[in-house]
Image (tube, rainbow, N blue to C red):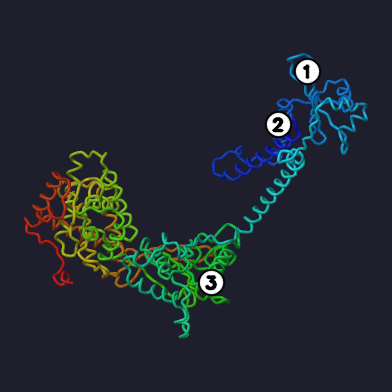
């Protein structure tokens, strides 16, 4: 092995060259893999060119050559010819000769006593015995007998590596380089060819961590019942096919954001135990024409191989908008994608055991071809959860959280009217965060109430130091809201009043409905407007001036009054007519969009809105004047304690003879 390590310079040189090739190629691979084109990056951070890499490699080769010559000196001084070897044998200066194939290692006798023997190297003729060669050069048999000749045929891994290394290493390096560049070319072609492949993610039935069932989804009983039929279709399709029934091809789920459209789609796949392909409508659309259609074909092809299966397209309005209204016309990439979806759902090839589910918040903008029978046969509408459903949703999201003994989810569900499932999940998560920030081991009721106010209004502005005058204005402003809401019969009861700043509000009055309203009446809207103007009236009455505090109240009241007139037909002067709020506009192509309203109609609308607002102002003034003592006590109490919860607030109302609003007995019994 020593002979291989220190004497074979060629082998070492070729081996180091192969290593340099590998290092250069690996460096190039890592650089190209890690680079990411970001905005603001300079050009000098781009990948080096191939020519630059080749020049760098050649410079390294030269450097390696110098290093090999420096660290492994030449052995030519020890080399002698076979004739010189024969002469040394004849002179009796040779002590031992070791024969290794054609190589000769000659050990000379020391010239002086105590000196180290000298070593020489030589080569003999191939295929000829050493003794015959030396005899031919005049060495006598007696002289040969005086030296020790050892035959040591080289063998093993070191020998063959020394023999084949100078040829195999460059060859292997060349093969590796060719393979690497072929792989790069193949990868580039593969990326170009796979550009049109589907980007759908898949949840397999065996993946229990991501599996969702109907038990994990609360509320929307009607929607779940409708979707249970789809589960039965997927579980037992022969049952329906034998009756001549066709399996529905598409289910369109519509509803407000956060109502659980995606969760229900996953629950259908989880209940049916079928593969679930999910992606967004924007995943189809790219800058290259035809890519979206290609991805649709690839998606359906992949899903058919694994059928029965479910394809879920979230936000389908990204590609499913009505055709013919864009500038691109029929050649628009989005429209080509939509055309391919239509063909795949109800084209020439039947899609048995394959159901397409889609979700959107804007079903009104979808193309009619998507909604016809044979495409999205079923339409499932998801509503905001009512009070019992909100409690069930809170229980689901709180099951994996350490809730304290004082947590009352019924109270939280009562105070979260209008919350979606996603809002309730965010509420529970905020409660856990607040508990963790206070270094608690469990989540308390106060954490959830704090999270509720944070989600609804915003975080506390603890750094805001209000002056005494600002606190007084805020207290009377909120007291005006509260007293009007408590007196007017169709206004919602007050649950909490506070002057602690949150978000952009200096204080707030939390009022919650006793019962879930699906059809608000005109009286409800008028009482709501009067309650919103209570703060304005209170500031005007107590301070004789108006601040910017009621600005948002005025905005909400004006919008409600305008909707009453223009959308709900709650004005005797306008009558049951819906007036479009959009002015007439000239669109692309010369078309005119929007209603051409007359000037008289606009004046009438403004007059009716003004009447409703002023009627609300008068009602608020009447309530605050009639119940002035209760109004003042609420404001002064707020200045002392800053926050009035429902029980403390109701005590003040009872003290001044104001009835506490409660549900009717019949509804309580129900």
Foreground residue among 617 and 270: 270
| Residue receiving disc 2 | 2
What is the C-alpha distance between the residues marked 1 and 2? 24 Å
Q: Tell me the element at label 3.
A: helix
Q: How many residues crowd around disc 2 within 10 Å: few (fewer than 14), some, or many (20 or more)? A: few
Q: Earlier in the sequence, mark 1 or mark 3?
A: 1
- Quadrant of the snapshot with the C terminus: bottom left
The spot of residue 70 in percent (x, y) is: 72, 25
**Residue 420 in sight from this viewpoint:** yes
The spot of residue 365 in percent (x, y) is: 45, 67
Q: Residue at x 45, y 82 (%)?
A: 240
Query: Disc 1 vs disc 3: which is toward the camera?
Result: 1
Q: Tell me the element at label 2.
A: helix
Q: Is residue 409 left or right of residue 649?
A: right
| Residue receiving disc 3 | 342
Residue 144, picture quadrant: top right
| Residue receiving disc 1 | 110
Query: Disc 2 vs disc 3: which is toward the camera?
Result: 2
Foreground residue among 108 and 199: 108
Foreground residue among 246 and 398: 398
């Amino acid at each position: 092995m020593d002979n291989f390590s220190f004497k074979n310079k060629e082998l070492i040189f070729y081996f180091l060259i192969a290593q340099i090739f590998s290092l250069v190629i690996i460096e190039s691979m890592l650089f190209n893999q890690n680079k990411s084109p970001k905005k603001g990056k300079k050009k000098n951070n781009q990948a080096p060119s191939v020519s630059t890499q080749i020049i760098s490699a050649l410079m390294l080769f030269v450097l390696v050559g110098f290093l090999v010559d420096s660290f492994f000196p030449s052995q030519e001084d020890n080399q002698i010819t076979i004739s010189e070897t024969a002469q040394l044998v004849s002179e009796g200066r040779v002590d031992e000769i070791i024969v290794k194939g054609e190589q000769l290692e000659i050990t000379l006798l020391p010239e002086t006593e105590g000196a180290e023997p000298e070593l020489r190297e030589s080569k003999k003729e191939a295929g000829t015995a050493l003794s015959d060669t030396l005899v031919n050069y005049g060495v006598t048999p007696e002289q040969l007998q005086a030296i020790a000749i050892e035959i040591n045929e080289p063998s093993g891994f070191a020998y063959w590596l020394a023999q084949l290394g100078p040829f195999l290493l460059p060859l292997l390096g060349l093969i590796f380089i060719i393979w690497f560049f072929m792989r790069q070319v193949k990868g580039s072609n593969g990326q170009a060819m796979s550009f049109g492949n589907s980007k759908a993610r898949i949840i397999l039935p065996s993946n229990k961590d991501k599996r969702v069932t109907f038990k994990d989804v609360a509320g929307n009983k009607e929607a779940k019942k409708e979707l249970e039929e789809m589960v039965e279709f997927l579980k037992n399709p022969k049952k329906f096919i034998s009756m001549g029934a066709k399996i529905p091809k598409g289910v369109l789920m519509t509803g407000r954001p956060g109502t659980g459209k995606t969760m229900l789609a996953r629950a259908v796949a989880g209940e049916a135990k079928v593969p679930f392909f999910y992606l967004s409508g924007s995943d189809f659309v790219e800058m290259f024409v035809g890519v979206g259609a290609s991805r649709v074909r690839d998606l359906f092809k992949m899903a058919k191989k694994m059928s029965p299966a479910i394809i879920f397209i979230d936000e389908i309005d990204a590609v499913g908008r009505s055709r013919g209204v864009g500038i691109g016309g029929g050649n628009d990439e989005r429209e080509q994608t939509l055309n391919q979806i239509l063909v795949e759902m109800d084209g020439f090839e039947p899609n048995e055991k394959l159901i397409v589910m889609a979700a959107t918040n804007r079903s009104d903008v979808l193309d009619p071809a998507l909604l016809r029978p044979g495409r999205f046969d079923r339409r499932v509408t998801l509503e905001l959860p009512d009070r019992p459903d909100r409690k069930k949703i809170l229980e689901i999201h709180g099951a994996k959280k350490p809730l304290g003994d004082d947590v009352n989810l019924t109270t939280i569900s009562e105070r979260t009217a209008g919350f979606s499932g996603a809002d309730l999940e965010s509420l529970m998560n905020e409660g856990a965060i607040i508990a963790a920030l206070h270094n608690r081991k469990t989540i308390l009721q106060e954490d959830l109430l704090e999270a509720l106010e944070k989600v609804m209004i915003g975080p506390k502005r603890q750094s805001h130091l209000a002056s005494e005058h600002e606190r007084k204005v805020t207290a009377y402003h909120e007291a005006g809201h509260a007293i009007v809401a408590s007196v007017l019969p169709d206004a919602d009861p007050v649950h909490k009043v506070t002057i602690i700043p949150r978000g952009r509000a200096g204080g707030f009055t939390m009022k919650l409905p006793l019962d879930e309203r699906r059809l608000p009446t005109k009286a409800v809207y008028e009482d709501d407007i009067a309650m919103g103007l209570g703060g304005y009236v209170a500031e005007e009455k107590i301070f004789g001036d108006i601040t910017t505090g009621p600005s948002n109240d005025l905005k909400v009241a004006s919008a409600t009054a305008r909707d009453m007139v223009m959308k709900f037909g709650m004005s005797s002067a306008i009558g049951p007519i819906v007036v479009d709020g959009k002015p007439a506009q000239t669109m692309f192509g010369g078309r005119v969009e929007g209603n051409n309203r007359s000037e008289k109609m606009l004046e009438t609308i403004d007059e009716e809105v003004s009447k409703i607002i002023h009627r609300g102002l008068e009602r608020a003034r009447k309530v605050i004047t009639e119940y002035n003592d209760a109004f003042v006590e609420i404001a002064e109490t707020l200045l002392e304690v800053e926050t009035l919860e429902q029980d403390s607030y109701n005590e003040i109302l009872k003290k001044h003879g104001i009835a506490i609003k409660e549900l009717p007995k019949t509804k309580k019994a129900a």
